[in-house]
Image (spheres, rainbow, N blue to C red):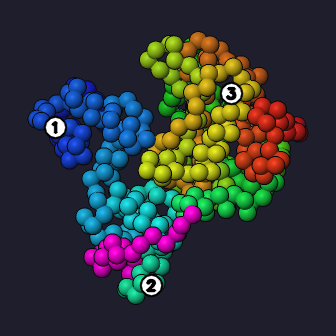
Amino acid sequence: MQLYRLGDSGPAVADVQATLTVLGLLSGRHDSFDADTDRAVREFQQRRGLSVDGLVGPETYRALAAARWSLGDRLLSLATHPFVGDDVAALQERLLELGFDAGRTDGVFGPRTERALRGLQREYGLVPDGTCGPATLRALRQLGRHVTGGRPQVMRETEALHRSGAALPGKVVVIDPGHGGSDRGAQGHGLDEASIVEDLAARLEGRLGAVGVRTLLTRGVDSNPTDAERAEFANDAGADLVLSLHVDRAASPRCHGVACYHFGAGRGTTSTVGEQLASLVQREVVARTDLLDLHVHEKTWDVLRLTRMPAVRLELGHLSHPGDAARLADPAFRDTVAEAVLVAVQRLYLPPDLDPPTGVMRLPVFS
Protein backbone atom coordinates (compact mmCIF):
# COMPACT_ATOMS: atom_id res chain seq x y z
CA MET A 1 0.00 0.00 0.00
CA GLN A 2 0.97 3.65 -0.36
CA LEU A 3 2.82 5.31 2.51
CA TYR A 4 1.03 8.30 4.02
CA ARG A 5 3.01 11.04 5.72
CA LEU A 6 3.17 14.71 6.68
CA GLY A 7 1.60 16.86 3.93
CA ASP A 8 -0.54 14.12 2.32
CA SER A 9 -4.31 14.36 1.96
CA GLY A 10 -7.23 12.34 0.64
CA PRO A 11 -9.76 9.72 1.82
CA ALA A 12 -7.15 7.38 3.32
CA VAL A 13 -5.69 10.20 5.42
CA ALA A 14 -9.20 11.18 6.56
CA ASP A 15 -9.80 7.54 7.54
CA VAL A 16 -6.60 7.50 9.61
CA GLN A 17 -7.60 10.77 11.30
CA ALA A 18 -11.08 9.43 12.09
CA THR A 19 -9.58 6.43 13.87
CA LEU A 20 -7.11 8.59 15.79
CA THR A 21 -10.01 10.81 16.87
CA VAL A 22 -12.02 7.82 18.14
CA LEU A 23 -8.96 6.70 20.09
CA GLY A 24 -8.69 10.12 21.73
CA LEU A 25 -5.35 10.94 20.13
CA LEU A 26 -6.56 13.68 17.78
CA SER A 27 -9.18 16.40 17.97
CA GLY A 28 -10.50 19.16 15.75
CA ARG A 29 -10.81 19.37 11.97
CA HIS A 30 -7.82 18.52 9.79
CA ASP A 31 -7.80 18.87 6.02
CA SER A 32 -4.46 17.12 5.53
CA PHE A 33 -1.81 15.04 7.27
CA ASP A 34 -0.67 17.98 9.39
CA ALA A 35 1.66 18.31 12.37
CA ASP A 36 -1.09 17.31 14.83
CA THR A 37 -1.82 14.18 12.83
CA ASP A 38 1.89 13.37 12.72
CA ARG A 39 2.14 13.66 16.51
CA ALA A 40 -0.98 11.50 16.96
CA VAL A 41 0.38 8.82 14.62
CA ARG A 42 3.69 8.76 16.48
CA GLU A 43 1.93 8.47 19.84
CA PHE A 44 -0.20 5.62 18.48
CA GLN A 45 2.88 3.85 17.13
CA GLN A 46 4.62 4.23 20.49
CA ARG A 47 1.65 2.74 22.34
CA ARG A 48 1.32 -0.19 19.94
CA GLY A 49 4.98 -1.20 19.84
CA LEU A 50 5.54 -0.11 16.23
CA SER A 51 8.41 1.80 14.64
CA VAL A 52 7.85 5.42 15.66
CA ASP A 53 8.40 7.24 12.36
CA GLY A 54 5.11 9.09 11.73
CA LEU A 55 4.57 7.10 8.53
CA VAL A 56 1.32 5.22 7.97
CA GLY A 57 2.43 2.09 6.12
CA PRO A 58 1.01 -1.46 6.15
CA GLU A 59 1.77 -2.26 9.79
CA THR A 60 0.54 1.05 11.21
CA TYR A 61 -2.58 0.93 9.04
CA ARG A 62 -3.22 -2.67 10.18
CA ALA A 63 -2.85 -1.62 13.81
CA LEU A 64 -5.19 1.35 13.32
CA ALA A 65 -7.80 -0.92 11.75
CA ALA A 66 -7.44 -3.40 14.64
CA ALA A 67 -7.81 -0.65 17.24
CA ARG A 68 -11.30 0.23 16.01
CA TRP A 69 -12.84 -2.93 17.44
CA SER A 70 -13.91 -3.67 21.02
CA LEU A 71 -15.12 -7.05 22.22
CA GLY A 72 -18.85 -7.27 21.45
CA ASP A 73 -18.80 -4.99 18.41
CA ARG A 74 -19.16 -7.94 16.00
CA LEU A 75 -19.61 -11.72 15.88
CA LEU A 76 -16.25 -13.47 15.91
CA SER A 77 -15.61 -16.88 14.34
CA LEU A 78 -13.10 -18.73 12.20
CA ALA A 79 -13.27 -17.42 8.66
CA THR A 80 -11.42 -17.74 5.36
CA HIS A 81 -10.00 -14.28 6.00
CA PRO A 82 -9.39 -14.29 9.76
CA PHE A 83 -10.94 -11.62 11.94
CA VAL A 84 -8.19 -9.30 13.20
CA GLY A 85 -8.63 -6.67 15.86
CA ASP A 86 -8.45 -5.59 19.46
CA ASP A 87 -11.72 -7.42 20.08
CA VAL A 88 -10.03 -10.69 19.11
CA ALA A 89 -7.08 -9.86 21.39
CA ALA A 90 -9.50 -9.17 24.27
CA LEU A 91 -11.24 -12.50 23.64
CA GLN A 92 -7.91 -14.35 23.58
CA GLU A 93 -6.82 -12.70 26.81
CA ARG A 94 -10.11 -13.64 28.49
CA LEU A 95 -9.89 -17.25 27.33
CA LEU A 96 -6.33 -17.49 28.64
CA GLU A 97 -7.39 -16.09 32.01
CA LEU A 98 -10.08 -18.80 32.19
CA GLY A 99 -7.55 -21.54 31.50
CA PHE A 100 -8.21 -22.18 27.80
CA ASP A 101 -5.19 -22.23 25.50
CA ALA A 102 -5.86 -19.54 22.88
CA GLY A 103 -2.15 -19.17 22.15
CA ARG A 104 -0.42 -15.83 21.95
CA THR A 105 -2.55 -12.71 22.29
CA ASP A 106 -1.95 -11.63 18.71
CA GLY A 107 -5.42 -10.32 17.79
CA VAL A 108 -5.88 -12.90 15.00
CA PHE A 109 -8.83 -15.31 15.23
CA GLY A 110 -7.19 -18.55 14.10
CA PRO A 111 -7.79 -22.28 14.70
CA ARG A 112 -6.20 -22.22 18.16
CA THR A 113 -8.50 -19.42 19.30
CA GLU A 114 -11.50 -21.30 17.90
CA ARG A 115 -10.53 -24.50 19.76
CA ALA A 116 -10.18 -22.56 23.00
CA LEU A 117 -13.55 -20.86 22.45
CA ARG A 118 -15.27 -24.19 21.73
CA GLY A 119 -13.70 -25.60 24.89
CA LEU A 120 -15.13 -22.75 26.94
CA GLN A 121 -18.55 -23.17 25.34
CA ARG A 122 -18.64 -26.93 26.01
CA GLU A 123 -17.52 -26.57 29.61
CA TYR A 124 -20.12 -23.94 30.42
CA GLY A 125 -23.11 -25.52 28.67
CA LEU A 126 -23.19 -23.27 25.62
CA VAL A 127 -23.57 -24.35 22.00
CA PRO A 128 -19.96 -25.20 20.99
CA ASP A 129 -20.17 -23.46 17.62
CA GLY A 130 -16.87 -21.58 17.88
CA THR A 131 -18.65 -18.24 17.45
CA CYS A 132 -18.35 -15.47 20.00
CA GLY A 133 -21.88 -14.10 20.04
CA PRO A 134 -24.21 -12.62 22.70
CA ALA A 135 -24.53 -15.81 24.81
CA THR A 136 -20.77 -16.35 24.92
CA LEU A 137 -20.16 -12.69 25.72
CA ARG A 138 -22.59 -12.89 28.65
CA ALA A 139 -20.74 -15.94 29.97
CA LEU A 140 -17.37 -14.21 29.63
CA ARG A 141 -18.65 -11.24 31.65
CA GLN A 142 -19.99 -13.48 34.41
CA LEU A 143 -17.03 -15.84 34.79
CA GLY A 144 -14.15 -15.08 37.12
CA ARG A 145 -10.49 -15.72 36.45
CA HIS A 146 -9.53 -19.39 36.95
CA VAL A 147 -5.77 -19.38 36.36
CA THR A 148 -3.74 -18.07 39.31
CA GLY A 149 -0.06 -17.83 40.12
CA GLY A 150 1.01 -16.11 36.89
CA ARG A 151 -0.08 -15.34 33.36
CA PRO A 152 -1.10 -18.63 31.68
CA GLN A 153 0.64 -18.13 28.34
CA VAL A 154 3.86 -17.21 30.15
CA MET A 155 3.65 -20.47 32.11
CA ARG A 156 2.99 -22.48 28.93
CA GLU A 157 5.96 -20.92 27.09
CA THR A 158 8.28 -21.51 30.03
CA GLU A 159 7.13 -25.10 30.50
CA ALA A 160 7.58 -25.86 26.78
CA LEU A 161 11.14 -24.51 27.01
CA HIS A 162 11.94 -26.74 29.99
CA ARG A 163 10.43 -29.83 28.34
CA SER A 164 12.54 -29.35 25.21
CA GLY A 165 15.77 -30.08 27.12
CA ALA A 166 19.21 -28.46 27.08
CA ALA A 167 20.62 -30.25 24.02
CA LEU A 168 20.67 -28.34 20.72
CA PRO A 169 20.71 -31.32 18.28
CA GLY A 170 17.27 -31.86 16.78
CA LYS A 171 15.99 -28.35 17.41
CA VAL A 172 14.69 -26.30 14.48
CA VAL A 173 15.73 -22.66 14.11
CA VAL A 174 14.42 -20.38 11.38
CA ILE A 175 16.92 -17.70 10.34
CA ASP A 176 15.28 -14.65 8.78
CA PRO A 177 17.66 -12.34 6.88
CA GLY A 178 15.73 -9.09 6.42
CA HIS A 179 14.68 -7.51 3.11
CA GLY A 180 16.02 -9.21 -0.05
CA GLY A 181 15.54 -9.15 -3.81
CA SER A 182 15.16 -5.60 -5.06
CA ASP A 183 14.63 -4.32 -1.50
CA ARG A 184 18.15 -3.78 -0.18
CA GLY A 185 17.05 -2.23 3.12
CA ALA A 186 19.28 0.28 4.88
CA GLN A 187 22.27 1.56 2.93
CA GLY A 188 25.35 3.56 3.75
CA HIS A 189 29.12 3.74 3.29
CA GLY A 190 28.96 1.45 0.25
CA LEU A 191 27.08 -1.30 2.11
CA ASP A 192 23.50 -2.51 2.02
CA GLU A 193 21.51 -4.28 4.73
CA ALA A 194 20.30 -7.21 2.62
CA SER A 195 23.82 -8.29 1.66
CA ILE A 196 25.15 -8.00 5.22
CA VAL A 197 22.37 -10.06 6.78
CA GLU A 198 22.57 -12.67 4.01
CA ASP A 199 26.24 -13.19 4.88
CA LEU A 200 25.54 -13.19 8.61
CA ALA A 201 22.71 -15.71 8.10
CA ALA A 202 25.05 -18.03 6.19
CA ARG A 203 27.66 -17.86 8.97
CA LEU A 204 25.03 -18.49 11.64
CA GLU A 205 23.48 -21.32 9.61
CA GLY A 206 26.87 -23.03 9.42
CA ARG A 207 27.52 -22.71 13.14
CA LEU A 208 24.06 -23.93 14.16
CA GLY A 209 24.25 -26.83 11.72
CA ALA A 210 27.64 -27.87 13.13
CA VAL A 211 26.12 -28.42 16.58
CA GLY A 212 23.16 -30.41 15.24
CA VAL A 213 20.50 -27.72 14.83
CA ARG A 214 18.26 -27.95 11.77
CA THR A 215 18.22 -24.49 10.20
CA LEU A 216 15.82 -23.01 7.65
CA LEU A 217 16.08 -19.66 5.85
CA THR A 218 12.98 -17.58 5.19
CA ARG A 219 14.26 -16.32 1.85
CA GLY A 220 16.82 -16.68 -0.90
CA VAL A 221 18.97 -13.97 -2.43
CA ASP A 222 16.32 -12.96 -4.99
CA SER A 223 13.18 -13.03 -2.82
CA ASN A 224 11.61 -10.70 -0.28
CA PRO A 225 8.62 -12.24 1.52
CA THR A 226 6.43 -10.06 3.72
CA ASP A 227 6.92 -10.33 7.46
CA ALA A 228 3.58 -12.18 7.68
CA GLU A 229 4.81 -14.70 5.09
CA ARG A 230 8.05 -15.17 7.01
CA ALA A 231 6.06 -15.83 10.20
CA GLU A 232 3.82 -18.31 8.37
CA PHE A 233 6.91 -20.11 7.04
CA ALA A 234 8.25 -20.51 10.59
CA ASN A 235 4.87 -21.70 11.89
CA ASP A 236 4.49 -24.26 9.09
CA ALA A 237 8.03 -25.54 9.80
CA GLY A 238 7.22 -26.06 13.48
CA ALA A 239 10.34 -24.10 14.43
CA ASP A 240 11.56 -23.85 18.00
CA LEU A 241 12.96 -20.33 17.52
CA VAL A 242 13.09 -17.52 14.95
CA LEU A 243 16.13 -15.27 14.58
CA SER A 244 15.42 -12.23 12.40
CA LEU A 245 18.54 -10.35 11.28
CA HIS A 246 18.57 -6.66 10.37
CA VAL A 247 20.85 -3.64 10.19
CA ASP A 248 19.61 -0.14 11.04
CA ARG A 249 20.24 3.39 9.83
CA ALA A 250 19.22 6.84 11.07
CA ALA A 251 18.90 10.39 9.82
CA SER A 252 21.75 11.43 12.11
CA PRO A 253 25.21 9.91 11.47
CA ARG A 254 25.77 10.04 15.24
CA CYS A 255 23.26 7.27 15.94
CA HIS A 256 24.96 3.93 16.49
CA GLY A 257 24.70 0.70 18.44
CA VAL A 258 22.88 -2.64 18.60
CA ALA A 259 19.37 -3.43 19.85
CA CYS A 260 17.26 -6.58 20.10
CA TYR A 261 13.48 -6.90 20.00
CA HIS A 262 10.86 -9.42 21.09
CA PHE A 263 7.06 -9.56 20.93
CA GLY A 264 5.29 -7.37 23.44
CA ALA A 265 2.11 -5.33 23.27
CA GLY A 266 1.99 -3.75 26.71
CA ARG A 267 -0.43 -4.63 29.52
CA GLY A 268 1.73 -7.67 30.35
CA THR A 269 1.19 -9.22 26.92
CA THR A 270 4.62 -10.46 25.97
CA SER A 271 6.61 -13.50 24.85
CA THR A 272 8.53 -14.28 28.03
CA VAL A 273 10.89 -16.75 26.37
CA GLY A 274 11.31 -14.35 23.45
CA GLU A 275 12.28 -11.63 25.90
CA GLN A 276 14.75 -14.01 27.56
CA LEU A 277 16.33 -14.92 24.22
CA ALA A 278 16.48 -11.27 23.13
CA SER A 279 18.27 -10.41 26.37
CA LEU A 280 20.78 -13.22 25.87
CA VAL A 281 21.48 -12.24 22.25
CA GLN A 282 21.88 -8.58 23.21
CA ARG A 283 24.22 -9.31 26.10
CA GLU A 284 26.40 -11.74 24.14
CA VAL A 285 26.76 -9.38 21.15
CA VAL A 286 27.59 -6.41 23.40
CA ALA A 287 30.08 -8.46 25.44
CA ARG A 288 31.95 -9.74 22.35
CA THR A 289 31.98 -6.51 20.30
CA ASP A 290 32.37 -2.80 21.05
CA LEU A 291 28.91 -1.87 19.74
CA LEU A 292 26.93 0.52 21.94
CA ASP A 293 24.24 -1.26 23.99
CA LEU A 294 20.82 0.08 22.92
CA HIS A 295 19.08 -2.57 25.07
CA VAL A 296 16.09 -4.88 24.53
CA HIS A 297 12.63 -3.64 23.57
CA GLU A 298 9.09 -4.85 22.96
CA LYS A 299 7.57 -4.55 19.49
CA THR A 300 4.50 -5.86 17.66
CA TRP A 301 6.11 -6.26 14.24
CA ASP A 302 4.46 -9.11 12.32
CA VAL A 303 7.50 -11.41 12.37
CA LEU A 304 7.39 -11.21 16.19
CA ARG A 305 3.61 -11.08 16.69
CA LEU A 306 2.46 -13.77 14.26
CA THR A 307 5.04 -16.46 15.05
CA ARG A 308 3.85 -19.16 17.43
CA MET A 309 7.34 -19.71 18.84
CA PRO A 310 9.79 -17.31 20.54
CA ALA A 311 11.19 -14.88 17.98
CA VAL A 312 13.73 -12.09 18.21
CA ARG A 313 14.87 -9.40 15.82
CA LEU A 314 18.49 -8.26 16.00
CA GLU A 315 19.25 -4.73 14.72
CA LEU A 316 23.03 -4.95 14.34
CA GLY A 317 24.49 -1.46 14.16
CA HIS A 318 23.75 1.55 11.92
CA LEU A 319 25.03 1.80 8.35
CA SER A 320 24.64 5.57 8.64
CA HIS A 321 27.39 5.60 11.31
CA PRO A 322 30.97 5.33 9.98
CA GLY A 323 32.21 3.27 12.92
CA ASP A 324 29.34 0.75 12.83
CA ALA A 325 29.61 0.51 9.04
CA ALA A 326 33.33 -0.27 9.25
CA ARG A 327 32.65 -3.05 11.74
CA LEU A 328 29.85 -4.54 9.64
CA ALA A 329 32.10 -4.57 6.58
CA ASP A 330 34.60 -6.81 8.41
CA PRO A 331 34.03 -10.59 7.91
CA ALA A 332 35.77 -11.29 11.24
CA PHE A 333 33.25 -9.04 13.00
CA ARG A 334 30.33 -10.92 11.41
CA ASP A 335 31.90 -14.20 12.55
CA THR A 336 32.03 -12.87 16.11
CA VAL A 337 28.34 -11.88 15.95
CA ALA A 338 27.39 -15.33 14.59
CA GLU A 339 29.21 -16.95 17.52
CA ALA A 340 27.46 -14.61 19.97
CA VAL A 341 24.01 -15.55 18.62
CA LEU A 342 24.86 -19.27 18.69
CA VAL A 343 25.96 -19.04 22.31
CA ALA A 344 22.78 -17.11 23.21
CA VAL A 345 20.65 -19.88 21.69
CA GLN A 346 22.52 -22.54 23.71
CA ARG A 347 22.26 -20.53 26.92
CA LEU A 348 18.49 -20.20 26.46
CA TYR A 349 18.13 -23.96 26.97
CA LEU A 350 20.64 -24.42 29.79
CA PRO A 351 19.36 -24.77 33.37
CA PRO A 352 20.38 -21.86 35.63
CA ASP A 353 22.99 -23.89 37.51
CA LEU A 354 24.84 -24.70 34.24
CA ASP A 355 24.50 -21.30 32.57
CA PRO A 356 27.95 -19.62 32.26
CA PRO A 357 28.58 -15.87 32.59
CA THR A 358 27.98 -13.65 29.56
CA GLY A 359 30.79 -13.48 27.02
CA VAL A 360 32.85 -16.50 28.08
CA MET A 361 31.10 -19.53 26.59
CA ARG A 362 32.57 -21.11 23.46
CA LEU A 363 31.01 -23.82 21.33
CA PRO A 364 33.01 -26.06 18.97
CA VAL A 365 32.52 -25.33 15.27
CA PHE A 366 33.35 -28.10 12.83
CA SER A 367 34.36 -27.26 9.27
Q: Residue at x 50, y 13 (%)?
A: 253
Ranked by sequence position, the earlier of labels 1 and 3 is 1
Q: Which of 1 and 97 is in front in this view?
A: 97
Sequence-wise, the earlier of marks 2 and 1 is 1
- Contact (CB < 8 A) between labels 3 and 2? no
Amino acid on which the number 3 mark rests in the picture:
Val
For disc 2, the neighbor class at 10 Å (few under 14, some 14 to 19, many from 20) is some
Residues packed near mark 1 inside 10 Å, few (<14), some (14 to 19) or many (20 plus)? some
Give the residue displayed 76% in from the left and 44% down from the top: 347
Place of residue 165 in the rendered image (x, y in percent of width and height, measured from the top left)? 78, 58
**Residue at position x 46%, y 14% in the image:** 252
Considering depth in this image, is 224 or 23 the residue closer to the camera? 23
- 171 versus 128 height, above or below: above
User: Given the image, on which type of amino acid does mark 1 rest?
Assistant: Ser
Quick check: 254 above or below 85? above
Q: Residue 152 carries which label?
A: none
Nearer to me, 178 or 134: 134
Q: In which quarter of the image is residue 327?
A: top right
Please, what secondary structure does the residue beneath circle 1 have? Answer: loop
Which residue carries the number 2 mark? 122
Q: Earlier in the sequence, mark 3 or mark 2?
A: 2
Residue 98 rendering spot, x and y as whole percentages: 47, 71
Tell me which segment is drawn in magenta: 128-149
Q: In this view, does 354 lie above or below 221?
A: below
For image coordinates 53% across by 60% down, the residue present is 151
Q: Name the residue under label 1.
A: 27
What amino acid is labelled 2 in the image? Arg
Image x and y of residue 83, in percent: 36, 62
* Magenta highlight on residue 183: no
The answer to whether residue 201 shows anywhere in this view is no
Q: Mark 3 points at which residue?
A: 286
User: What is the spatial separation of the Cα atoms under label 3 and label 2, in whole angstroms?
Assistant: 51 Å
